[in-house]
Amino acid sequence: MDHIVSLVPQVTSERTKVSNAIPGPTPLPLIGNLLQLGIKPHESLAELAKTYGPLMTMKLGRVNTVIVSSPGVARQVLQTQDHVLAYRTIPDAIRALNHHEDSMGWLPPNQQWRSLRKLCNSHVFSAQHLNANTGVREKKVNDLLKFVHEKAMMKEMIDVGQVAFATILNLISNMSFSVDLFDVRSETVQEFKR
């Protein structure tokens, strides 16, 4: 558990860097410790934890990964060191248009992230706001069920991914802008999804 404290100073950039202060198996070049995960990773990690302890590092490909394998250490890590583990590797596709600088999903836990989280908690995910949109959610589910029923009566196949995507997108757009973006019967939703 003393190793958890050593995580804090190891964050030296946007990406979390893990030094050898936390024990772990020696990685191979390029693939790291991927082969050690085996076909049953949960069992492999349990075995590795017997050797390296409940907190260890592994290199999965080129990504340093901290593995926590006991409830006590997980509680400590998630309650007291969550700010360190909140950093994530940002894919190049997200960096291309600088979306990582404004998106709550990619921001590090800084003041901008806290402000966005507070705004979401008070205006988007508050119980009052969610309860106010119960009718919208029920309508979208009923629309989905009606569509599935129509297709079943005509004995036609349904692309569940496309219909689910359109339903979720319409639910979000209705909650935000009071309009449907897509008709679930349209092929444009599939193009948008791609």
Image: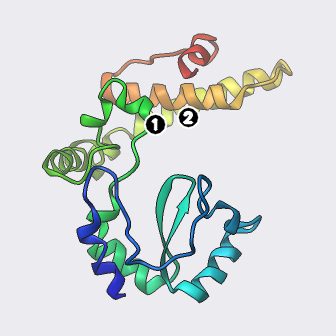
Mark 1, Cα crowd under 10 Å, few <14 / some 14-19 / many 20+, is many
**Residue at horizontal 77%, vertical 21%?**
151
Name the kind of residue labelled 1 in the image. Answer: Arg
Q: Does 177 appear above or below 71?
A: above
Whether residue 173 sits left or right of residue 65 in the image: it is left
Toward which corner of the image does residue 158 lie, by quadrant? top right
Disc 2 crowd, CA 10 A, few/some/many (<14, 14-19, 20+): some
Of 66 and 130, the residue lying toward us: 66
| Image position of 174 with respect to 117: above or below | above
Q: Nearer the viewer, residue 56 or 28?
A: 28
Instruction: Find residue 141 and report its horizontal and vertical position in percent.
Output: 56, 34
Give SS at disc 1: helix
Q: Residue at 54% of width from left, 29% of height from top?
A: 167
Q: Where in the figure is residue 131, as x and y percent of width and height?
A: 34, 46
Spot occupied by residue 53 in the image (x, y as percentages of width and height): 51, 86
Say which residue appears at 56% left-offset and 58% top-offset. 60
Quarter of the image holding residue 6?
bottom left
**Does dot 2 land on a helix, a strand or a loop?**
helix
For residue 84, side relative to residue 65 (left or right) = left
To which residue does mark 1 refer? 137
At x 58%, y 20%, the residue is 194
What's the residue type where badge 2 is placed? Val
The answer to whether residue 108 is visible is yes
Residues under numbered marks 1 and 2 in contact, where contact means CB atoms less than 8 Å apart = yes
Image quarter hosting the N terminus? bottom left
Looking at the picture, does residue 177 appear above or below residue 60? above
Between residue 168 and residue 146, name the one nearer to us.
168
Q: Which residue is mark 2?
A: 141
